């Protein structure tokens, strides 16, 4: 049996602006999806969603991943079991992680010799097939790991402070929120375009700060980024409640991560404040996850 895992991600800066070509900084987090594969009589996919064969409704990402790999290898029967630490549909990149880990595991089992660039590319094609219009960010970060500047695909040093994620447990549709921002931008281009460009500028400023480990200044800018995300209409009462719960309990910074609307927020934790932030998030009605960023992208377990 082969087991591969791939990480989820958070955005430190730049969600939404990245859709318009601005820069973003994303980091892989130590919350992973594990995929176990072994040859079998038929195709079987097992997860908490159920046990199926190729099934584009229940297991779309894994089903397309098998079909894509069937173009490279003679895959007749394979049993695939998925275990994930990543909440589904909350903006932490769970679909990218399962897709990337499945491709890597099948690549090893069937000796296809794919490079990491190949894996990231194939996983992005699958996300586009399932979601319509997905940016390559999640699949790239999940494959390569680390802190990555997008669209430059430049690796930055790791962020050395703990990360606390707060999940509102409210589903949000990335497609819908991206559509709302597009609408606002076309209504008020002279207002919204500078906001998106300011968000991109913050990512560019933060690149240097990440190199200098200057988390206080990074945090200040992340908080400004949060204000601008609110300004473009992707905030929500639940997200703001968790953001302020974190900030009032020692977080260096706290902002939405991902599409917004619902889903998750992310906080950089100050010295010794990790559990206070996590408790405050839980008390405010969210689900707290304490994690850190990771240099490791997809890997063989
Ligand atoms: O919520 P997520 O992790 O799917 O992130 C969406 C990020 C956006 O910038 C809003 C859209 C995109 O495709 O980059």
Image (cartoon, rainbow, N blue to C red):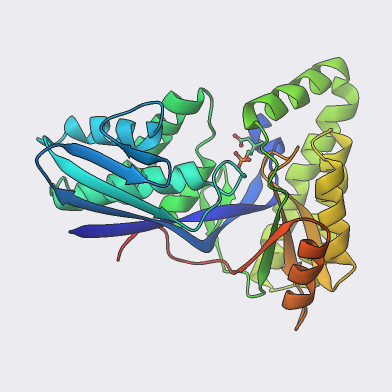
Which is nearer the eye, 268 or 2?
A: 2
Which quarter of the rendered picture does the N terminus lie within?
bottom left
Across and down, in percent, residue 139 comes to 46, 44
Q: Residue at x 70, y 41 (%)?
A: 170
Residue visible at 9% across and 40% down in the picture: 41
Residue at left offset 53%, top offset 31%: 134
The reply, left or right, for residue 161 in relation to residue 71 is right
Residue 189, visible in the rendered structure: yes
Camera-side residue: 44 or 201? 44
**Residue furthest top in the image:** 187
Q: Does residue 121 appear in this view?
A: no
Q: Position of residue 47 (x, y in %)?
A: 37, 46
- In which quarter of the view is residue 72 placed? top left
Image location (x, y in percent) of residue 180: 76, 23
Residue furthest to the front in view is 50
Question: Quarter of the picture for ligand 1?
Answer: top right
Measuring 40% from the left and 32% from the top, which residue is drawn there? 58
Residue 174: quarter of image: top right
- Side (left or right) of 273 relative to 100: right
């Amino acid at each position: 049996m082969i087991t591969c895992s791939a990480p989820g991600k958070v955005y430190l800066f730049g969600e939404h602006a990245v859709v318009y070509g601005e820069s973003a900084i994303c980091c892989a987090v130590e919350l992973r999806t594990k995929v176990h594969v072994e040859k079998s009589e038929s195709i079987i996919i097992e997860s908490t969603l159920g046990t199926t064969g190729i099934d584009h409704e229940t297991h779309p990402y894994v089903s397309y991943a098998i079909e894509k790999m069937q173009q490279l290898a003679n895959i007749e029967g394979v049993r695939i079991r998925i275990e994930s630490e990543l909440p589904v549909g909350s903006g932490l990149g769970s679909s990218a992680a399962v897709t990337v880990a499945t491709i890597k595991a099948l690549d090893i089992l069937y000796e296809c010799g794919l490079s990491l660039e190949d894996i990231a590319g194939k996983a992005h094609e699958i996300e586009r097939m399932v979601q319509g219009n997905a940016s390559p960010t999640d699949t790239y970060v999940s494959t390569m790991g680390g802190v990555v500047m997008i669209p430059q695909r430049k690796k930055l040093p790791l962020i050395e402070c703990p990360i606390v994620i707060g999940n509102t447990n409210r589903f949000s549709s990335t497609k819908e929120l991206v559509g709302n921002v597009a609408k606002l931008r076309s209504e008020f281009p002279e207002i919204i375009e500078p906001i998106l460009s300011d968000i991109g500028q913050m990512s560019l400023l933060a690149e240097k700060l990440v190199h200098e480990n200057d988390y206080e200044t990074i945090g200040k800018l992340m908080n400004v980024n949060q204000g601008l995300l609110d300004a473009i209409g992707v905030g929500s009462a639940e997200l703001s409640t968790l953001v302020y719960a974190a900030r009032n309990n020692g977080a260096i910074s706290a902002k939405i991560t991902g599409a917004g609307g619902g889903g998750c927020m992310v906080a950089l934790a100050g010295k010794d404040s990790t559990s206070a932030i996590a408790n405050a998030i839980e008390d405010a009605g969210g689900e707290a996850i304490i994690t850190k960023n990771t240099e490791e992208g997809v890997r063989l377990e």
